[in-house]
Amino acid sequence: MVEAPGEQVRGLVIAIDGPSGAGKSTVSRQLAERLGYLQIDTGAMYRAVAYLMNQAGIDPADHDAVRRFCTTVDVRLDSVAGVQRVIANGQDVTRQIRTPEMSLMTSRVSALAPVRDAMMLAQRRMGAAGGVVLEGRDIGTVVFPDADVKLYLSASTEERGRRRHAELVARGEQVTLEETINAVAERDAQDSQRDLAPLRMASDAIAIDSSGKDVAEVLDMMEAACKIRSGMVGFSS
Ligand code: DC
């Protein structure tokens, strides 16, 4: 990035979009660590809203109740000893938002306009100063259409299902591989077929397929893409 005289260098806005299980969280966190940037997991923000709505007994079909509820929502991403915590209306919900039930519920709740409006505003505020890696579904298309770098990370449905299954089993969830692959496919359909901010690749994004690649390989491809697109201000290697 070229610095105009008298202008302060700001960090880049890096948008990483793609379907669930493509490995966005892991590579976003590591990319952010390398750059000394803030990582913003926007999926966690939607999960937190879905959790609070469920806890408050709000029916996603009740538009007035959803709209009122969204004016009371406060979602924060804190880092405690290098580990990201998700705080929703003051409650630490980091663990509770990661169950298979919450994944499907979040996919429904994230299609609601008042929820998307509230989260988009919060995400724009968090990323406004730059120096951020935001991961989600609509970062490069809707939240930051002028992002400095846009990456679209994908992998085959089977591979994404296998990765998600391994994560769930490691957390002690009782779920089969077949159920997990089906759930991933169902979420893909919901996320990409909704009217508002559907999952799609921005026309100016660089596509990276993580099938059959390990984290280090994907990270290398991302760094290369970032260098090409931006000149990588603040990148040391
Ligand atoms: O990335 P994730 O699996 O934690 O996301 C959970 C859900 O949130 C996902 O089904 C789609 C939704 N989401 C969204 O609609 N927009 C985003 N920017 C991020 C996630």
Image (cartoon, grey):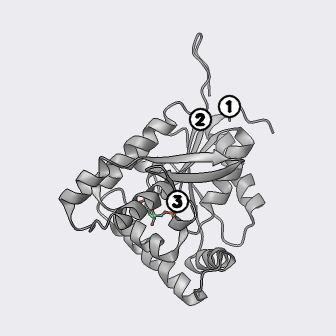
Q: Residue at position x 66%, y 71% from top?
A: 211
Of residues 151 and 234, which is closer to you in this image? Answer: 234
Q: Which residue was labeled with disc 1?
A: 233
Of residues 141 and 176, which is closer to you in this image? Answer: 176
Please, what secondary structure does the residue beneath circle 3 have? loop
Q: Pinpoint residue 12: horizontal percent, then vertical percent.
A: 59, 35
User: Mark 1, mark 3: which one is toward the viewer?
Assistant: 3
The answer to the question of whether label 1 and label 3 lie on touching residues, with beta carbons closer than 8 A, is no
Of residues 200 and 129, which is closer to you in this image? Answer: 129
Q: Is residue 15 among the parts visible in the rendering?
A: no
Q: Pinpoint residue 182: horizontal percent, then vertical percent.
A: 49, 84
N-terminal of the two: label 3 or label 2?
2
Most distant residue in the left direction: 64
- Side (left or right) of 212 relative to 185: right
Q: Residue at position x 43%, y 50% from top?
A: 89
- Side (left or right) of 162 relative to 112: right
At label 3, which amino acid type do we have? Val
How many marks are shown on the rendered structure? 3
Q: Which residue was labeled with disc 3?
A: 93
Q: Pinpoint residue 127: horizontal percent, then vertical percent.
A: 51, 37
* Quarter of the image that includes the C terminus: top right
Distance from the alpha carbon under mark 2 to that under mark 1: 7 Å
Distance from the alpha carbon under mark 3 to that under mark 2: 29 Å
Please, what secondary structure does the residue beneath circle 2 have? loop
Q: Which residue was labeled with disc 2?
A: 12
Count residues near mark 1 (Cα–Cα under 10 Å), then give few for <14, some for 14-19, many for 20+.
some
Q: Which of the labelled discs sits on residue 20, or is there none?
A: none
Q: Pinpoint residue 141: horizontal percent, then vertical percent.
A: 42, 49
Q: Is residue 129 among the parts visible in the rendering?
A: yes
Most distant residue in the right direction: 237
N-terminal of the two: label 2 or label 1?
2
